[in-house]
Image (spheres, rainbow, N blue to C red):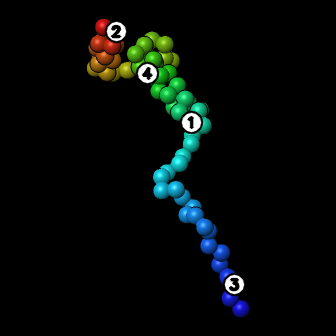
Amino acid sequence: MAARTHSRPHPATTGGVDIRLPWWALALPALAFLVLLALILNPSDAQAATGDPAVTRLLEHAQQFLAR
């Protein structure tokens, strides 16, 4: 005996994508980006601040550029 299938009167979707993110789904990546950017711009605050002199010069130039 075959079972009857029930069809919905309206489609399951309205044609558009409706995705709602919680506030922290955008705030946490933005906060992490800002913290990492601050560490890059001020490498003396980082624990392992020693590195290649070329990279250090590049970061100093970027910091001076952003400070203008």
Give the mark toward the camera: 2 or 3.
3
What is the CA distance from the residue labelled 3 to the residue labelled 1? Answer: 43 Å
Q: Position of residue 17 (x, y in %)?
A: 49, 51
Residues under numbered marks 4 and 1 in contact, where contact means CB atoms less than 8 Å apart = no
Question: In the image, is residue 47 above or below residue 30?
Answer: above
- Residue at x 42%, y 13% (from the top left corner): 42
Residue 7 rendering spot, x and y as whole percentages: 62, 73
Indicate which disc, 4 or 1, sits on the residue closer to the N terminus: 1
Answer whether labels 2 and 3 touch (C-beta < 8 Å). Answer: no
Q: Which residue is mark 1?
A: 25
Residue 49 in view (yes/no): no
Secondary structure state at the residue bearing disc 4: helix
State how far apart marks 4 and 1 are (Cα). Answer: 19 Å
Residue 35: x, y in percent? 50, 21
Asked if labels 4 and 2 touch by Cβ distance under 8 angstroms, the answer is no
Residue tagged 3: 3
Q: Which residue is mark 4?
A: 37
Of callouts 2 and 4, the N-terminal one: 4
